[in-house]
Image (spheres, grey):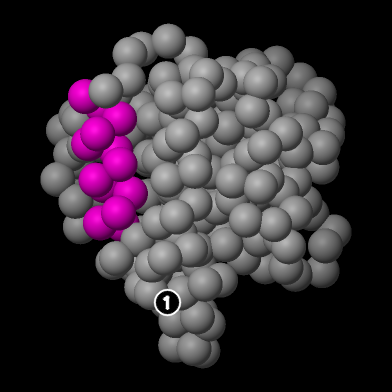
Amino acid sequence: MNHRSLLLSLGLSLVTLPAFSQSLVSSEKYSDNPMDGVGVAHNAYAGCMAANYDQTGKTTPIEVVVYRCGIPTQGDPEAFIRKYTDMANNTRPDPKLSFVENMNRYRENYNAQQFSYFERIDKVLVGSTSPEEADRGLKALEDQAIKELGRTDGDLAVLGVISTGRHSIELWTKDHPVGEAATQRGIPWALIGQIAGADMSGYASGANICGKVCGYVNAAVQSVVAVFN
């Protein structure tokens, strides 16, 4: 394992600790969201995949996250690659649809209260004119969800979706060179919002299949695919 991968693995083993999570979120105090760690993990893996992205297409993002980013595969790495490649392909959001339109196929997994947060997230993404405005809107929803929702799987999935969205916006507009380059090229906020929507949809679909690890890995893959495609 190379030096970068070792540090990444160590960091991700600690993302549930408040102090460490705070150190990874440059512009935000540690969140009270119990699912904040999935947003941290999303950014770590998406950032690593982007930094090691193969423009030739010979190496897929999943292969990069296994062999360059050091993600624990809990067994055969090739089986991990096949599993997450199939998951990413089968859950890829339609870029022509809004976030909530992409989420409609998962509606049966959530009660009315939980799904209403996705509708409100969509309004934030559509109605915002800048990353800062979007983050304020998502932060308000996050604060409300922390107080209002319980801790069932569906409730935690909603909190994980919001965490993923907030961290995604920060990754591609502040923390990562790809985001900085995109801003300098004049790529509009609407595209960053579309990427964040893809990430959030990716988290929800992955988490519905096999839990939060599947959620943040799938979200990170959808993020990198949306950025580079």
Residue 98: give x, y in percent of width and height.
62, 56
Comparing 94 with 221, the one in front is 94
Query: In the image, is 14 to the left or to the right of 58?
Result: left
Q: Is residue 129 visible?
A: yes
Comparing 122 with 199, the one in front is 122
Q: Which residue is mark 1?
A: 180
Q: Which residues are magenta?
A: 135-147
Residue 16: give x, y in percent of width and height.
30, 24
Instruction: Kindly give the residue lying farthest to the top in the view shown.
Output: 152
Residue at 50% x, 80% y is: 188
Comparing 39 with 5, the one in front is 39
The answer to whether residue 143 is magenta is yes
Residue at 42% x, 45% y is: 120
Query: In the image, is 206 to the left or to the right of 105?
Result: left
Comparing 151 with 86, the one in front is 151
Residue at 82% x, 37% y is: 90
Residue 73: give x, y in percent of width and height.
65, 24
Q: Is residue 55 above or below residue 110?
A: below
* Quadrant occupied by the C terminus: bottom right
User: Splitting the image into 4 quarters, where does residue 149 fall?
Assistant: top left
The answer to whether residue 84 is magenta is no
